[in-house]
Amino acid sequence: MNWSDFYKSLFLLGFFSIQTNAGEGVKIATWGSVEQSSTHSDWYAQKALDGVKSTCTHTDLESNAWWKLDLMKAYNVNRVTITNRNGCCSDRINGAEIRIGNNSSNVFSNPVCAVVSTIPEGATYSYPCYGMKGRYVSVDLPGPTAQHLTLCEVEVYEEEDLCEDET
């Protein structure tokens, strides 16, 4: 191999390494099905997975409002990303709990990955879950106070294992 080929190979290796976004993880939220505790008007649970950050889910005014994603099998979740709404009521997300686990009938029994203290209007925040394993990812507003849960985008990532043996 001559020096020209060597540098071309080095360039291509660097280019493809950048394109893989190492450490970003694999987005797995779009592979599942969703539901929520109630639906206000046409603000369906699926809108949190549509890839459009300006469309949102919205529950009715209720206590213990929740949104749940069924990933169809258990994954080691690396992080969950949530986009908050623009306009009014951006504080509705405050105090929400992100949970990951295998209980499908009671989302509140699954372990907590993170608690959302606040997300500014229209912003997207990422919450590390450090490989928590579970089939169900939920976001809930716990407690007896009636509240609306509104989510504009939820993304769930599994850590990409580039060294996994496929044998």
Image (cartoon, rainbow, N blue to C red):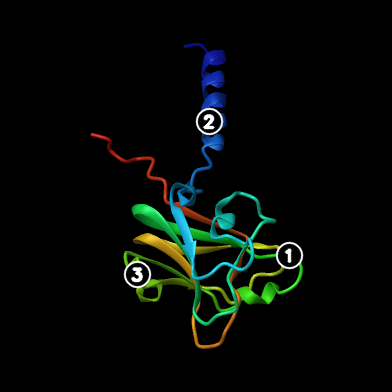
Between residue 44 and residue 17, name the one nearer to us.
44
- Which secondary structure, mark 1? loop
Q: Residue tagged by mark 1?
A: 86
Q: Residue furthest front?
A: 41
Instruction: Name the amino acid type tagged 2.
Output: Phe
Q: Residue furthest bottom?
A: 144
- Contact, mark 3 vs mark 1 (Cβ under 8 Å): no
State left or right for residue 150 relative to residue 63.
right
- Which secondary structure, mark 3? loop
| Residue at the spot 41% in from the left edge and 46% down from the top edge | 160
Ranked by sequence position, the earlier of labels 3 and 1 is 1
State left or right for residue 86 relative to residue 27.
right
**Is 24 rendered above or below residue 57?**
above
Between residue 167 and residue 52, name the one nearer to us.
52
In the picture, the disc for residue 105 is 3
State how far apart marks 2 and 3 are (Cα). Answer: 43 Å
| Residue at the spot 45% in from the left edge and 66% down from the top edge | 138
Foreground mark, 2 or 3, reads 3
Q: Residue tagged by mark 2?
A: 16
x and y percent of residue 122 in the render?
Answer: 71, 63
**Is 156 rendered above or below residue 118?**
above
User: Which quadrant of the structure image shows residue 45?
Assistant: bottom right
| Residue at the spot 59% in from the left edge and 56% down from the top edge | 47
x and y percent of residue 165 in the render?
Answer: 27, 38
